[in-house]
Image (tube, rainbow, N blue to C red):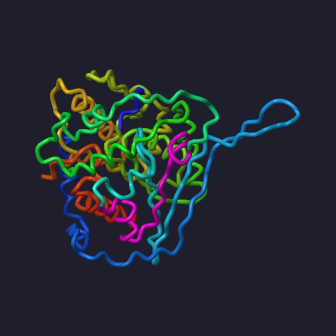
Amino acid sequence: MHSGQNNSPVAGVLIAAALALATCVVPAHAADDRNAQPAALMIKEQGSFAVGGTVIRSPGAEGQTLHGDHARVFYQVPVDARKLPLVMWHGFGQFGKTWETTADGREGYQTIFLRRRFPVYLVDQPRRGGAARSTVGTTISAAPDDQRWFNMFRLGRWPDFFAGAQFSRDPEALNQYFRQMVPDTGPFDAKVATDAVSALFDRIGPGVLVTHSQSGGLGWIAAMKNPNVRAVVSYEPGSGFVFPEGEVPAPMQSMTGPLEGFAVPKAEFAKLTRIPIVVYYGDNIPEEPSKNFGEDNWRVRLAMARLWTEAINRHGGDATLVHLPELGIRGNTHFPFSDLNNVQVADLMSGFLARKGLD
């Protein structure tokens, strides 16, 4: 999701790689039969904890303290678990709920990948959701804005859904969807957020980082900070694209303002070339400027992501951009992992993990 901050030969190779990924699915999960009785889910261990954060102390003899700016993590480890856990990090306006039950009541990525025997860790980043305790105050507005997010997250153009949109038309699904939005309880701080997620990887060891939207750019930073991030799966990263110094592309203009890349030292950027990365984008993203702000917003973000994956690969890395419509997978919103076809989308991720020896 948009943070509010801010085809070349290579592209052909990326598309070919994406098509190869599409064939590496897990057949046992190819059908999403809501009438079938799911098998029992066997959980060996589960719990929650805070990680990262800081403590501030009031002046004077009383010395009152405030523990804040930590991440909150809920985890489950299935029986006969695979070696590497999946750390799932939400986007803007969201918290761990993003990965749980879908708005229309189906299993989300949390349960889908537990069934595939991955330990799953759900993050609420600092100053959000269950990690709301902030060391810096803020004012939380109560402005009506549901329709803005309907457009921005590409369900359609309010009040109409896009034709073929992979979202339930049950009014209760849209009600649940709007009700999973949460505010920031303090100023957004990329360092605070990435320090907390890096501390999580210090605690749990090697794993795969799964990001969405705002956490996409944060995920690159976390991966550069912590070598325990062994791969990144990113759904529709919206900002924070990092490039080596001297290689930052020109800002891209859109109806939501300019999208800029950010320079990092080449030695830091090189860390991203040592791990496999896959980036997924959904449908209804135009190639040409649009008069609809939600679509135009994602036009430039997809374009920047293409330049970013090309930069990773140009420096010897392993990054693949998968634009789902190019695989014939259509109708996906900004939330491919919770859309009606989320099992099909999950199969692509399972294929990636298998191809890279991460399962």
**Span of residues in magenta:** 106-131
Query: Which quadrant does the N terminus fall into?
Result: top left
Front one among 6 and 91: 91
Residue visible at 44% across and 28% down?
263
Residue 122 lies within the magenta run: yes
Residue 10 lies within the magenta run: no
- Residue most toward the right? 61
Can residue 21 be seen in the rendering of this structure? no
Q: Position of residue 275 (x, y in %)?
A: 42, 52
Q: Is residue 38 left or right of residue 340?
A: right
Residue visible at 39% across and 55% down?
99
Q: Is residue 26 above or below residue 278?
A: below
Q: Is residue 56 above or below residue 41?
A: above
Residue visible at 20% across and 49% down?
324
Q: Is residue 80 above or below residue 85?
A: below
Q: Position of residue 200 (x, y in %)?
A: 57, 53
Residue visible at 39% across and 67% down?
359
Front one among 203 and 102: 102
